[in-house]
Amino acid sequence: MSYLEILSETIVFRSLSMEEIEVILENSVFQYKRYKKDEIIAQSGAPCNHARIVVEGNVSGEMMDLSGKILKIEDIVPTMMIAPAFLYGKRRMYPVNVISLGDTVIWQMHRDEFSRLMQQNLTLLDNFLSAISSRAQFLTEKIKFVSFPSIRAKIAGFILHYSQEKETLQLPITHQQMSELFGVTRPSLSREIRKMNAEGIIDSERDVIRIVDRDRLTALLKV
């Protein structure tokens, strides 16, 4: 897949054909920057002056706690933007270290040039605003679920919230996205779901969850 095809699948350029994207970018200044494994793409506190999209490889947003332990905040995969919410506003700085997890290619454009493009193309502007709004909504949801006292409580709260009194829930996001939302590891999430299955609280199969015992599920909110 070409870089142009990958750009066409990003939230910023969605609804635009590759031909339209090519026309938009032909008179613009941008770069494809390459990074090797463990190379720092951006340091926490550094100015966020460029719109950046991962087009190849994977990167990680990481921070160090007071004990010196590295905490992974988020994995950023192809088609995702890096720190879009920090590109504008008063505090235009990266909130975490951004590290390449392998050979990686980043599409980047200076904020001023990116602003010019959005002024000229309302689809780009609408897409970028949608990306910011979606990120803000995700973080709001994360705060809500992180406040639950245990992984089980987070899972129970999620199921009860999205099932809307129905007995069967088609998961609106992937298990990986759920683990990021809850602030837990994917294996920990999967392990608790299996235990809840075994205990007859839910019946889960891939992205479909059936509530078997709603009373016990509700009781988990306090555990």
Image (cartoon, rainbow, N blue to C red):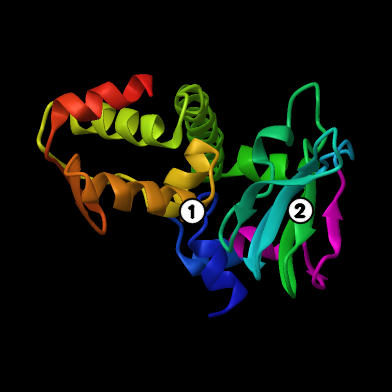
The answer, for residue 1, to whether it is visible in the render is yes
Q: Amino acid at mark 1?
A: Arg
Which residue is nearer to you in this view: 60 or 64?
64
Is 156 placed above or below 179 here?
A: above
Neighbourhood count class around disc 1 (C-alpha, 10 Å): few under 14, some 14–19, many 20 upward = some
Q: Residue 76: percent from the left, percent from the top?
A: 62, 55
Question: Which quadrant of the structure image shows residue 23?
Answer: bottom right
Contact, mark 2 vs mark 1 (Cβ under 8 Å): no
Image point (30%, 32%), residue name: 156
| Position of residue 11 in the picture relative to residue 212 (left or right) | right
Is 92 placed above or below 212 here?
A: above
The residue indicated by pointer 1 is 186
- Helix, strand or loop at label 1? It is helix
| Position of residue 90 in the picture relative to residue 24 (left or right) | right
The residue indicated by pointer 2 is 109
Residue sticking out furthest to the bottom = 1
Q: Which residues are magenta?
A: 23-43
Image point (19%, 43%), residue name: 202
Q: Residue 110: percent from the left, percent from the top?
A: 80, 48
Image point (22%, 44%), residue name: 199
Q: Amino acid at mark 2?
A: Met
